[in-house]
Every structure is written in C-alpha cells, then in structure tokens.
Amino acid sequence: MNRIAGFTLRSLWLWLILSLPVIASTRVDNPFVGAQGYIDPDYVENVNRSIAQSDTATAEHMRVVANTPTAVWLDSIAAIDGSNGRRSTLEQHLVNATKQAQGNEPVLITVVIYNLPDRDCSAKASNGTLNGLAGLKIYREDFIDRIASLFSDNRFSDLRIVTILEPDSLPNLVTNKSVADCQSAFENGIYTGGIGYALNRFSDIGNVYSYLDIGHSGWLGWDDNRTRTVDLYVDVIKSSGSLHNVHGVATNTSGYSPVEELLLPDADLMIQDLPIKSADFYQYNGMFDERDYANTLKTEFTAAGMPDQFGVLIDTSRNGWGGKNRPTKAKRKASINNYVNAARIDRRPARQNWCNQNGAGVGARPTPNPFNDGTIHAFVWIKPPGESDGTSDSTQTHADAEGKRFDSDCDPQGTTHSGNPTGAIGNAPAAGRWFHQHFDMLVRNAHPPLIK
C-alpha cells in the first residue's frame, strides 16, 4: 500500500512540475547583451523581392538589411496563425528562432503585440478588427492567452523573448483624449485593462521580457506630457500585479526621430535672445532626440519606483536620415528657424509626421547597450524597414479585412492638421505591406552606411 501511495505521489509531483510555466534558468538585467537576434525568414523573402528589382550596388546594401534582426508583428488574431497565409505562424517563428542558435549565445526574438480593441484611436491607417469591451474579452482569451501559451512551451525555454506592447496606445491616452475614439478607450479602460492583463500573463514566463511602447521625443517630450505619461504608465504597471512585470519602455517605434541631433546638442542655446527650442520645428519641446528622451525617462521612472534594471529601447530602423541632405555643420543664420532647419538631422516637415516619410534612411544597426550606460538597453529594428506605414490610396475609405484604410496623413499632396506638408511618398500600400519604393529610399539614405 505504501509503495502504491509513494508511486502515486511521485506521479502527481511530476505532473505538477510539467504543468508549471517554463521559467528560464537565468534572468538577466539586459536581455540583449550576450544574445543573437532573430532573422525573420518572411522579412528576408520581402527584401529578396526588392533585390530582384535593384541594381547590383543597391542589392548588395539590401542584403545587409536582410541579415539584420527585425521584430515580428502580431497585429491580429490571424497573425498568430500566419495572417491569412502572408506570414509564418508565431509557432513557426519560435521554432525557426531555436534553429538559428549558434554557439552558446541564446537567440533573442522580438515580438510586437499590437491588437488592442479600438487601437490607433487618433488615426485611421491601422485600426484593427477588435472593438469595445466585447473585443477586450476576445483580446484576452483568444489573443494574449494563446500567445502566452506558445511562449511558455518548453520547446522555447532557451529563447529570450522580448515583447513590445501596443504601439501608440497609452501615448494616445496622454495627449489625444479630445478625440472621441481615444476618450472612449480611456473611459472604458480598454487600453489600460488589456495591457495590464498582457503584462500579468507574460510575467509568469521567465524568459519573456516586456517593454511598453512610449511614443517618441517629438510626441511626449514636453515636461507636462512626460509627467502625465510616467504617472499613467506606473499605474498600468501596478495594475498588472508588480512593478517588476515591465522590463522597460520602447521609444520611436515605427518612428523617424534621430537618436541624437548632433549639431543641436543644447536646446537652450540662445539665438537672438531666444532658446532654439522655441523654433517652429521644436515648439518649446526641449527633447530634440531619442537619447535625451530615453535618459530623462529612465530618471523619472526610477524616481517613480521602477526597478534599477528598467531600461529603454530605441527603434533605429528608419531614423538614419543619411544621403545628400544630411547636414554636416551648424550655420549661424539670421533667425532661429533658419539656424535649426539648417542643422537638424531630422528632415521631416514637422516632428508629428509619421507616414512613409520622404528622405528617411535606415538608422544604426541593432546594438546591445550602445552607450554602455545601463539606460538604453539596445538599438532595435522594431519596424522592419520596407513595411508601409499606411496606404496613400485616398479611395480606400473603408477598412479592409485587417481594419486598415486611408489616412490623410499618408497623402503625399496633403497637409496635416497643423498645416504642414505630410512628407509622405506616394504609391504606398496598406500598413504592414511591402513597399519597395520606400525600402529602396531607406537603403540609399542609410546612416551609418550599410557598407563602408
């Protein structure tokens, strides 16, 4: 009887162990250090399509991009299963990542979680397919729970999995509550509740590191915006159960803001008795670039109680701004606007411009701990260069099967709500689709150069 009981207890113990979420043996402060990035075969296939259309020299530069780690976007429930056949399934990506391991370094795969109900509430290019509180239930059970189940599969326990949670969602709650859809998302708690739930679910999986998207310096850089941002983010993180459920924040996701405005290092530099941050391009926002923004965020989040290992990622996939128009020195001009416009690396008509920007270039390659300061965990390519921001087809006024439609900010002949040219280029497909013309431009304007 005792032998039978002992066998039963041992069997029960084994079953319990196998039922627990997979916990990686070593949790690290910076997951990008000592890891090799995942090369997405689907992205390589898209780049190869452009290589086939390009001259020999350009094609050589494009091959460098093809061998660079990029993030995998889960922008719908269908994307988990391969997004109507256009992409690999999430499981296939994770399996591919395990196969890419070489030597003793783990493979790090970055996954963008982008499917909140009523997402992209202040724009139209990528609104998604879930809506309201009913959509939040689907988001939790059919999206986040399924992703968490795959992440916790012990086949993938040797991977480092980084999640970038819900681009543009919380930033919209900071600045755009005057927009009806954003106000509704705020009042219903859809964004905060969905993100809090995702953080809690992923926190049970020891090899998953979660970063919250936090806009960019040209959006949330003003002091009052940042104060409200930090307060909101800390509240959301607390709602997930622990401040340790977030490893950091990600800036400039799908953005164009430079890492450093090297010729404009001092926002308070005086020209004609006014600080250069008062120029039209900066509008008294003293955060000129993503490095300053990241350093300030680190200080403010730490002061708000976040753990010391809290860090920042910067998306550098499209913020290089190389090419013939890249300035090489600041020139004293007769006005603040002339001085700033001659010196700034960011060549957009306005910092708020976001859609398929003309003149942009691939930025710094993905790099762990680029400044060796423990603040910026890595440069990463969250937005795969060559994937469109939104369609320029003004006739696509109704959402397609993926919830995507025309936004006037993607009209190459149009102006934004602030009266500035959109800076977008034409012939653009729907958000996330391959856009060869934009990719060709990004490669040609890469800075640093892709091949020296």
Image (tube, rainbow, N blue to C red):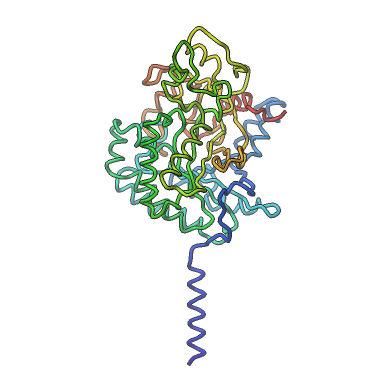
Residue 237 percent across, percent down from the top left: 40, 48
* Residue 128 visible, this angle: no
Q: Nearer the viewer, residue 192 or 298?
A: 298
Q: Nearer the viewer, residue 50 or 339?
A: 339
Image quarter of residue 367: top right
> Residue drawn at (44%, 39%), measured in percent from left and top?
300
Report the quarter where the C terminus lies. top right
Q: Nearer the viewer, residue 241 or 189?
A: 241
Total residue callouts? 0
Image quarter of residue 131: top left
Which residue is outermost to the top?
334
Residue 446 percent across, percent down from the top left: 62, 27
Residue 405 percent across, percent down from the top left: 40, 31
Can you say whether 225 is above or below 347 in the image?
Answer: below
Image quarter of residue 277: top left
Residue 171 located left or right of residue 178:
right
> Residue drawn at (33%, 47%), measured in percent from left and top?
135
Can you say whether 80 is above or below 278 in the image?
Answer: below
* Residue 182 visible, this angle: yes
Residue 42 located left or right of residue 12:
right
Residue 132 percent across, percent down from the top left: 30, 44
Which residue is outermost to the bottom?
1
